Structure formats: C-alpha cells, structure tokens
C-alpha cells in the first residue's frame, strides 16, 4: 500500500513538471526532490503546490519539490522509474491563468516565486555558488549524522541510567563509527562535486584519519589521527581534484591509468601531511573555541543576533557556509551549539504565521495556507510560510525575525549561565530537534531550555506580527474575501521547510 501511495505521488508530480521529456536529471536531499528541467515554463507551479503530498516548491539551481524527510527517499525511486517508463509521454499543459478577484494565497505564492527568482539572481555570484557546492558535499551526509546522533543520545541515556550495560559498547561503536570516518566521505563527495574522481578524493582524505600519521614528524610538529577533520578532508580532496585535472592535461593517454591516480594521491597526500592537516587543525580548533567562547561570554546577545539574522542569511544563500562549521563542531565536541539557537528563527516564523491567521479573519485563502503549513512549520519545515505568506507580505517577515531573535537570546542566555547544549546532527529543526539535543546539564534541563526558547520565539513572533506586522492599508487590502482560489479549491495548500 505504501509503495502504491509513493508511486501515485510520483505519477501526480510528473505531468506537472512538464513530463519526462522535460527532465534532464533527478536527485534528492533530505527533504526535497531536485529536478533539472529543460523548460521551466512547462511547470504547473500552482497545481503542483496543491498536491497533498507536496510540502512546497523552491526554484534554485534545480527545481526542488519538498516532500519531507522519509517521503522523499521513497518517492524519488518511483519518480525515476516513471520517467524511464514514460520518456515518450507528451508534456503537460501550460499553467492555468492566474486567479481573479481579491488577494489570495495563490497571489502571495506568485509573489513568493518572483522573490525566489530575484533571490536566485542575486545569489548567482561566484562566492555563493562556491558555498552552494560546499553545501552539496555535506547535505548527503545528513541522514547518517541524524541516525548516529540519535543512537549516541540513546547510548548516553542508557549509560546515565545504568541500564543494559552490555548494549552500551555496541551502541557506542554504531554511533561513533561514521564520525570516525566522516573525513573519507567528505573527501569522496568533494571530488565528486568538483569534477574529480570520487574515490581519489576519498583516498587522500583517508590519510587524515589513518592512525599511522602519529609516527610522522612534520617539521617538528606531531600529527594526530583526525587532525584537521572535515575541513582538512575538504581541502585535501579539492587539491586532489586540481592535481588530477592537471595530470590529465599533460600525461600521455596510454599512461594515464597508471600515472594520474598515482601522482594525484602522492602529491596531494604529501601536501596534506606536511601542511594541510596542521593548518586545518588550527582552523578547526579556532572555530570550536570561538563558538564556545562567544556563547559563554555573550550568549544572550549572540543568540539574539544569530536567531534574528538566520532567516535573512537563508534568503541571501549565506547559511550554507554554516554547514561545514556545524559538522566541525559535531566532530570536535559531539554536538553543534549553534543549531538550537538558529532553530529559533523557525519558531519566530511560526508565531508570525499564527498572527497572520488571526489578523486576516475574512481572507479564507491565506488562512487556509497558514493552517495547512503550520504542522510542518512546527517541525521546522517553514519555507511555504516564508515564500507563501510572510515574505510576500513584507512586514511579517521582519516580525518573524524579531521572534527568532527573542528565542535565540533566551537559549543563548542559558549558555552564558553555564548550561551549554547542542545538536548531535544537522538537518532537523523545530520539534524534530528534540531527539538530537545533548548537553552537560542533563536531558531534562536541556529539553526544557530548548522548549522554552521555542515558546519565546512563538510568543514574540506572534505578538510582534499581531501588533506591528500590518499597516491599516495592508489590513484594508488583505482582510477581505477574495473568492475561490484555484490553488486551494480542491486540494490542501502548500507546506515546506527552513534549513537550520
């Protein structure tokens, strides 16, 4: 039955993205089906958003359909199979005409799409494109980080309770195995993303975690296995890509299969051992030291700034720079102290959306969008609220940031008071982050502080939006009955997710 449901979802999506002949590539991350399209004009965006299984859509370098964690991994294979089976199918019809009448959720969605396009154009700078490629290296690792993080938390709970001591070493091995070799996966993905041979990137990165590096004297500096971590692995694999490409230009074709991989691993490996490991190790240590010092000495203010600016960072595409930082902190300390604070931005967004719902009692279309998106918003999936409600409205986006700042300040204050905690994995946010929280003060206090931060974010986001999120003219224009909205007449409106 589950397979039939996933296939039905895939079958419903396919004609709405222009049919199989309009698709050039298919991939997925933790929550999104990512499709490369030949002609974006063939996409029936509003109809796609109306599908019950679709939590939202995002147009970036690829067309991204948000299906949610778990669902996307099941729908994608069915979608790929349908594309292969129906390559000769005709493209779907063009999108229907925009709705007439007052302002509807569909109108806001159209404005959100225009804002996404503008954001996409602004984000197409070399630096931001590089950050996006770096994010592509780490995003495929998130499912393993989540799984191992939850197992590590379970192991810690059993250890503290003294239950099933024989199971604890097994859980520790399961939780730690991936993290001990994460550098290899980062190296593999780096080479793959930047056009090299993936296994060569993994081979060079593996040098970092090899126990034998402890016997190497690098100019009087003792090396330690794992020194440099994921940053060192990224740098080593990136160097390997450039060495490999240089070799392929100059090595005779008859000798390429022997000389190119040998020189790639040898040159990159030597530079890694006698330079990159030390430099990356210093950088990693500095990142960890600075993050912990920042929250310990100025936690409330730091939390306010981080929680308040995270949504704008997402809009600018700069949040992707945080992914390797999160991973470095997890590798060093077992958790990232930044993610629970950044997750407060989603809480502010939820509070703002609830205020929009109550401030527009006559606009059934927008209220339906908010109502359907809120459950996912509580789980940290909030892009439909951003692109479908708050950002097109303008002021509610700012007040959502205020809510995020208040929640971030609340959590940061407890860091400043000595109650530090973080997330053992990246990816989830909102309520979905609870199973991944880890702190020195114990599970009960850690969960209570995080829940308190969410509550503060909800309340401040709601109050700021309710009292300051609308001008009188906005209320006059928006608080009316716009009539039937084609995007909500027969199906539930969109939902979607904010990465943290």
Image (cartoon, rainbow, N blue to C red):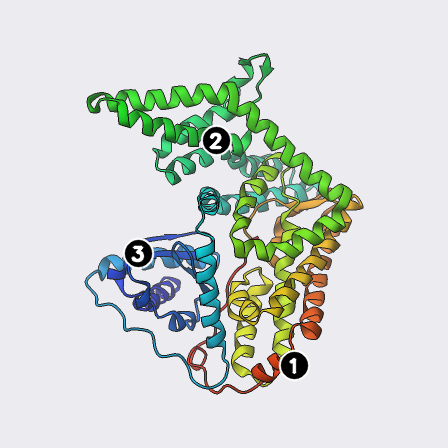
Residue under label 3: 80
> Is there any visible trace of residue 423 in the rendered image?
yes
* Image quadrant in which you'd find residue 54: bottom left
Give the position of the N terminus as an image quadrant. bottom left
Q: Earlier in the sequence, mark 1 or mark 2?
A: 2
Numbered-mark total: 3
Q: CA distance from mark 1 to mark 3?
A: 49 Å
Viewer-proximal residue among 69 and 317: 317
Q: Earlier in the sequence, mark 3 or mark 2?
A: 3
Q: CA distance from mark 1 to mark 2?
A: 54 Å
**Few, some or many C-alpha atoms within 10 Å of disc 3 (few <14, some 14-19, many ≥20)?**
some
User: In the displayed structure, does residue 463 sit left or right of residue 343?
Assistant: right
Residue under label 1: 472
Residue 101, compared with residue 197, is above or below; it is below
On the image, the x and y values in percent for residue 2 come to: 40, 63
Residue 337, compared with residue 211, is above or below; it is below
- Local secondary structure at mark 1: helix
Q: Are marks 1 and 2 in contact (CB under 8 Å)?
A: no
Residue under label 2: 235
- Local secondary structure at mark 3: helix
Residue 258, compared with residue 422, is above or below; it is above
Q: CA distance from mark 3 to mark 2?
A: 34 Å
Q: What residue is rendered at 77% in x and 50% in y? A: 413
Viewer-proximal residue among 72 and 235: 235
* Image quadrant in which you'd find residue 406: bottom right
Q: What residue is rendered at 68% in x and 62% in y? A: 402
Viewer-proximal residue among 108 and 365: 108
On the image, the x and y values in percent for residue 476 come to: 60, 84
Q: What residue is rendered at 55% in x and 28% in y? A: 280
Q: Earlier in the sequence, mark 1 or mark 3?
A: 3
Mark 3 or mark 2, whichever is nearer to me: 2
**Few, some or many C-alpha atoms within 10 Å of disc 2 (few <14, some 14-19, many ≥20)?**
many
């Amino acid at each position: 039955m589950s397979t039939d449901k996933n296939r039905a979802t895939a079958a419903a999506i396919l004609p709405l993205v222009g049919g199989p002949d309009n698709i050039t590539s298919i991939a997925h991350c933790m929550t999104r089906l990512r499709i490369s399209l030949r002609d974006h004009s063939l996409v029936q965006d509003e109809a796609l958003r109306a599908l019950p299984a679709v939590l939202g859509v995002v147009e970036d370098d690829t067309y991204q359909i948000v299906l949610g964690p778990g669902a996307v991994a099941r729908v994608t294979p069915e979608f790929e199979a349908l594309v292969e089976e129906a390559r000769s199918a005709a493209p779907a019809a063009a999108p229907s005409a925009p709705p007439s009448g007052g302002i509807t959720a569909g109108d806001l969605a159209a404005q959100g799409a225009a804002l996404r396009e503008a954001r996409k154009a602004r984000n197409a700078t070399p630096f931001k494109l590089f950050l996006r490629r770096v994010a592509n290296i780490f995003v495929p690792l998130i499912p393993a980080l989540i799984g191992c993080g939850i197992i590590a938390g379970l192991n810690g709970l059993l250890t503290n309770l003294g239950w099933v001591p024989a199971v604890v070493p097994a859980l520790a091995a399961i939780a730690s195995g991936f993290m001990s070799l994460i550098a290899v996966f980062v190296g593999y993905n780096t080479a793959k993303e930047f056009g090299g041979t993936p296994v060569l990137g993994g081979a060079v990165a593996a040098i970092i975690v090899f126990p034998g590096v402890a016997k190497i004297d690098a100019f009087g500096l003792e090396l330690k296995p794992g020194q440099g971590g994921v940053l060192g692995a990224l740098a080593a694999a990136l160097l390997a890509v450039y060495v490999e490409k240089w070799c392929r230009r100059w090595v005779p074709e008859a000798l390429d299969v022997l000389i190119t991989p040998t020189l790639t691993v040898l040159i990159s490996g030597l530079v890694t051992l006698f330079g990159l490991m030390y430099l990356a190790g210093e950088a990693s240590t500095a990142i960890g030291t600075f993050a912990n010092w920042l929250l310990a000495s100025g936690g409330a203010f730091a939390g306010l700034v981080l929680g308040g600016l995270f949504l704008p960072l997402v809009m600018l595409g700069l949040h992707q720079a945080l992914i390797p930082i999160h991973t470095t902190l997890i590798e060093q300390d077992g958790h990232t102290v930044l993610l629970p604070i950044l997750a407060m931005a989603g809480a502010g967004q939820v509070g703002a959306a609830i205020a929009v719902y109550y401030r527009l009692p006559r606009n059934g279309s927008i209220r339906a969008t908010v109502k359907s998106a809120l459950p996912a918003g509580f789980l940290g999936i909030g892009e439909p609220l951003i692109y479908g409600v708050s950002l097109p409205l303008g002021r509610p986006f700012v007040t959502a940031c205020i809510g995020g700042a208040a929640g971030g300040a609340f959590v940061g204050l407890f860091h400043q008071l000595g109650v530090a905690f973080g997330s053992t994995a990246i990816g989830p946010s909102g309520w979905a982050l609870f199973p991944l929280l880890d702190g020195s003060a114990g599970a009960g206090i850690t969960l209570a502080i995080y829940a308190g931060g969410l509550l503060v974010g909800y309340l401040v986001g709601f109050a700021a939006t309710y009292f300051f999120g609308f001008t009188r003219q906005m209320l006059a224009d928006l608080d009316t009955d716009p009539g039937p909205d084609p995007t909500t007449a027969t199906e539930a409106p969109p939902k979607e997710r904010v990465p943290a």
